[in-house]
Structures are given as structure tokens and as C-alpha cells.
Amino acid sequence: MKSKAILPILLAVALAAAGCRSSTDRSAGTVLLEVNMFNGLPITVSVATGPTQITSMTLKSIVKDPNGTTSSLQDIQMRSIEFTYTRLDNGTRVPPPLVDSIFGTVPVNGTLIINNQEFFRADQLLSPPLSDLTNFGFDQQNGTKVIPLRVTMRFFGRTLSGDDIVSDPASFNLDVVP
């Protein structure tokens, strides 16, 4: 009789544990992709002179089950990076997203360093609100000479075994000036 009562409890515990894992693991497969480190992040960017690059970023592959076996089929081939922008003031206009192809492989439990990755290109600099700084010297929406932005990036790849991998978003803040 006790074994019949224990079985539903064990099943409920197993389902709860599986539910917790699935809510934190957003990527398919057995590895996670993490933006591990930034170097050379600008605090202020001029639309006229830049800089519009991140000097260095390190991506890291983390095995979801550290006690499991690993193989090169868990290596992540990078495909693209996406930058999106959020205003940190009362403005509502933002530059269009930037999606860029990237190449490289993050070995299982290893890292990949990406150097001089652009986060603004002509599409962003020539679109409102950033184009307002070039054309008028201020943001026409709110009249300021500084546009504070949060830049958020996500990386997309695929393991050699075919699982699509997406990193969690990583962000930094900067001020854009004429």
C-alpha cells in the first residue's frame, strides 16, 4: 500500500525537476552558449567618429550535464549575432536591429574570442534617432544632444550534431553624441 502512495510522489518530484530544467535551458541540445567577457566597451560613441566596435568578446560553451560524456559533436559552429537597441530616456525611436553573420567554432567546454565586432553600421547611424545627431546636432524627438542606449546582443549557432543554440542576451549601456 505504501509503495502505491510513494509512486505518485516520486513522479511529481521528477516532473517538477524536469520542469525547472526546461525553464532555464532555452537552447536545444546538451550545451549552453554564454557571453563570458567583454573588453573595450565604449561608454560614449560619436556618430561622426565612433568607436562603433567592441574590442574583444569571449564566448564560452558550457555542458549542461557536467558529469556526462562530451564529444566534438557538441562543438558550436557560430552563425550570427543580433544587436537590438533600447532607449534609456523618454525617447521612443531606436535604430533598426543589426544582424551580422559570424564565423568560428566554440569547442565543447571551450571558448571563442571575437575581436572588433561592430555594433553600429550605416543602417543604424543613418536612421533616426542617430541620424538626427548628424543632421541637426540633437535628437528631434526630445531635443537632447545625447541619446542614451542599451545595446543588447544575442549569439546564434548550431552544434555539429544539429542542435540550434542561442545565447542569453548580454547588454551594455552607452551614450551616443553628435
Image (spheres, rainbow, N blue to C red):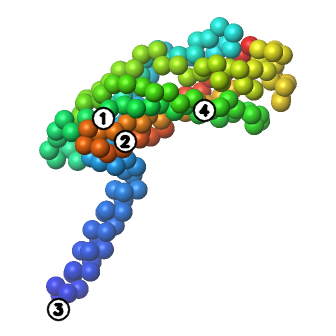
Identify the mark at residue 1; answer none if there is no mark. Answer: 3
The answer to whether residue 42 shows anywhere in this view is yes
Q: Amino acid at mark 4?
A: Pro
Give the mark nearer the N terminus: 1 vs 3: 3
Q: Quadrant of residue 34?
A: top left
Q: Which residue is mark 2?
A: 165
**Above or below: residue 166 compared with residue 16:** above
Q: Nearer the viewer, residue 142 or 156?
A: 156
Q: Circle 1 — which element?
A: strand
**Disc 2 from disc 4: Cα separation:** 20 Å
Separation of marks 1 and 4 at Cα, in angstroms: 24 Å
Q: Earlier in the sequence, mark 3 or mark 2?
A: 3
Q: Residue at x 74, y 34 (%)?
A: 93
Q: Mark 3 or mark 2: which is in front? A: 2
Residue at 23%, 47% in the rendered image: 65
Q: Which of the marked residues, 2 or 4, is nearer the chain's N terminus?
A: 4
Q: Where does label 4 land, which residue?
A: 97
The residue beneath circle 1 is: 76
Q: CA distance from mark 4 to mark 3?
A: 61 Å
Q: Label 1 near label 2: C-beta < 8 Å?
A: yes
Q: Nearer the viewer, mark 1 or mark 3?
A: 1
